[in-house]
Image (cartoon, rainbow, N blue to C red):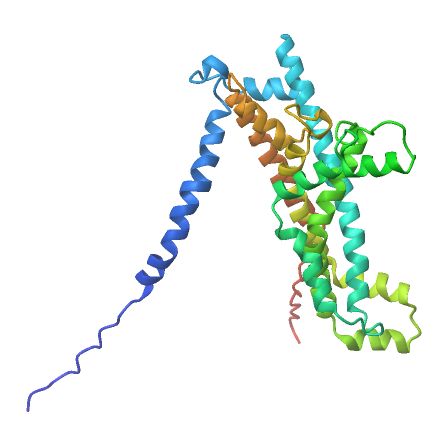
Amino acid sequence: MENTQAKPKKIVSYAKYGYIFIAPFFIVYAFFMLYPLINTFILSFKGNGSHLDEWVGFQNFQYLLFGGESRNARALQSSYWSSWGNTLLLWVGNFIIQLVLSLLLAVWFSDVRIKLKGSGFFKVAFYLPNIITAASVAGMFALLFANNKYGAVNSLLLDWGWIEDAFPFLNGAWSSRILVMIIQSWMWFGNTTLLLMSGIFGIDPSIYEAASIDGSSGANTFFHITMPILKPIFLYVFITSMIGGLQMFDIPYLFHEGNSLNNSLKTQAVLIYTNFHQTPANYGYSAAASVLLFIVTAALGMFIYRFNTDNTAPVKKKKHTTEGK
């Protein structure tokens, strides 16, 4: 008899199909994200105006951060730091309004004792401003708060006799900033409300029942149970809001009258855009400011995440051995 052995089964690997399916994402990411990022770093070490091809090292960063002897360098430094002030002010202002409003609405709509009807409709209504284009929102508010007497708000205030002349809502430093804060809060509070509501609905109801049996008040339950459990969601909302706030561009840039930009609304992103598109183009300054914004955003994000994360690792128990027993 012949000694026959069973032939090994051929193993078919489908891993290559997985790589084929994910390849389009990496190709698009490399072309539209990775290449522009690398090119921005390269441009930050090149010159400006008629010297775009010259390597200047860290000169662009030096002029932005510390200025220089020339008048243009000092003006660039002043504009750079003032844009940081505007960016932080607009972000903090709209984040406080957005968070307080979202938290109040989330607690209200998730309270089972109230049994609010039509909550689904209100959720959709709250989220609708988030899907409206920024250009439409900026144009609508610019018409409502136009500086002349034909603006809707100024027209009403003049008809009621509350003011004698049209108020410069768009040109005033604080009036324009407050309007941008309100617009940003109105556009994003719905998204934050839904996130907080999902976190509250994920809390075990038995925890609230136990707190109620123990005689815990509503405020005590909120601050000692709801808030600590929602900490991961607060962390996510804070980091995403910070990233969006530091890169705030559309509303501050579009929210002006005529061809002149409001310097009180010149954020970091607006500064980068105007330097990139002016004539002659300051590609080096714009790229250097972009790199600095990238570094600051990444550093703050990592710091906030590490600061709010419990770093306590489980301690391994040491094994004690006894001899002679």
In the displayed structure image, the side of residue 46 where residue 174 appears, left or right: right
Q: Nearer the viewer, residue 294 or 120?
A: 120
Residue 60, percent across and down? 56, 20
Q: Residue at x 45, y 34 (%)?
A: 38
Q: Which residue lies furthest to the front in this view?
A: 159
Query: Residue 286 is drawn in which quadrant?
Result: top right
Depicted 203 relative to depicted 136: above or below: below
Q: Residue at x 15, y 83 (%)?
A: 5
Q: Nearer the viewer, residue 164 or 101?
A: 164
Q: Which residue lies furthest to the left in this view?
A: 1
Residue 187, percent across and down? 69, 49
Query: Residue 288 is drawn in which quadrant?
Result: top right
Depicted 212 relative to depicted 2: above or below: above
Depicted 242 relative to depicted 80: above or below: below
Residue 136, percent across and down? 63, 43
Q: Which residue lies furthest to the bottom in this view?
A: 1
Residue 291, percent across and down? 56, 31
Q: Which residue is drawn at 83% across and 29% down?
A: 166
Q: Taking the image as drawn, is residue 247 in sight?
A: no
Quarter of the image containing the C terminus?
Answer: bottom right
Q: Residue at x 6, y 88 (%)?
A: 2
